[in-house]
Amino acid sequence: MRIINFNITEKDSGKQIKTFLREFGVSSSLLTKLKHTENGITKNGVFAKTIEELSTDDILTIKIENSGHIARPMYIDIEIPYEDDDIIVLNKPPLMPVHESRNHIGDTLSNFVAYHCGEDMAFRAVYRLDRDTSGLVLVAKNELAAAKLAGKIKKDYYAVVDGIIKNDGIVDAPIARCGDSIIKRKVDENGEKAITEYFPVKSSDNRTLVKFNLKTGRTHQIRVHMEHIGHSLLGDSLYGGNCSDISRQALHCKDIYFTHPITEKAMHISCDFPEDIKNLV
């Protein structure tokens, strides 16, 4: 359960509680849940209806109960670069899924979060990484945080690719499913718009460490676009990458930038490269 207090200032004086909460980012469905939670909404410690008006120096409190899918708890050795009452940021190792599935039970990020945060906290990853991709995954600890963060995370990806890239560039090429495959994608004029910015960082031995900013979020976007321009990711067997020095696609989410869902402060979280990518560069 998450209890959040709001100190009402002059700019919000006179607003109805429901107006204040909706402006802060509380969804209509969560507002309904709060209404049906015992003391889900209080003003100065007393139960309050959402049509009541707020005054300067009031303390408005909401109580968000846990709900949603809960994975089975399992200890796994995972680095936590940042954590507070509303979010937890995990440095996902390569070859680890984010969610449980038929083939992965007990060995995912969701299992570790259930162990670390408590069995009654639902798992709300704000975005997911492929099983083989390493790096930062942001998990919301409550429904309000998840809603306010959805689609609002800027991520810096890094990859090691075949060949030498000397200049910054942009790939603007639509992506579609590859035939009947449910996994593989390809550049196709009939696909969905996809834009990838890339910035070479370091080159040696006919390979380049590249930083990426995604303007869209298509499945396998970086991998498909780099194959398209002739610079497949090392280790990426699905898209023609050289697998002699690494056994998975050399792709890592190193930095994330976002506004904290409750404090509304600007946040930047970073992590180091895993050893297999360090060995390549």
Image (cartoon, rainbow, N blue to C red):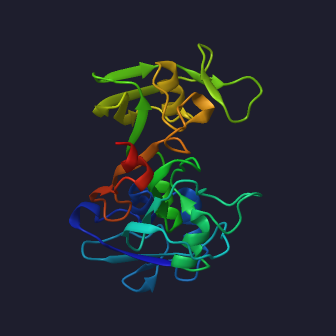
What is the quadrant of the C terminus in the image?
top left
Q: Nearer the viewer, residue 218 or 135?
A: 135
Q: Residue furthest left?
A: 10
Residue 173: give x, y in percent of width and height. 50, 18
Q: Nearer the viewer, residue 141 or 2?
A: 141
When asked about the image quadrant of residue 184, the answer is top right
In the figure, 76 relative to 27: above or below? below
Residue 153: give x, y in percent of width and height. 40, 48
Residue 179: give x, y in percent of width and height. 74, 22
Q: Nearer the viewer, residue 183 or 244?
A: 244
The count of marks equals 0
Q: Do we see residue 194 in this rendering?
A: no
When asked about the image quadrant of residue 121, the answer is bottom right
Q: Residue at x 45, y 24 (%)?
A: 231
Q: Residue at x 46, y 18 (%)?
A: 229
In the figure, 189 relative to 107: above or below? above
Q: Residue furthest top?
A: 189
Q: Is residue 202 left or right of residue 249?
A: left
Q: Is residue 37 left or right of residue 276?
A: right
Q: Residue at x 56, y 61 (%)?
A: 124
Q: Do we see residue 21 in this rendering?
A: yes
Residue 151: give x, y in percent of width and height. 47, 45
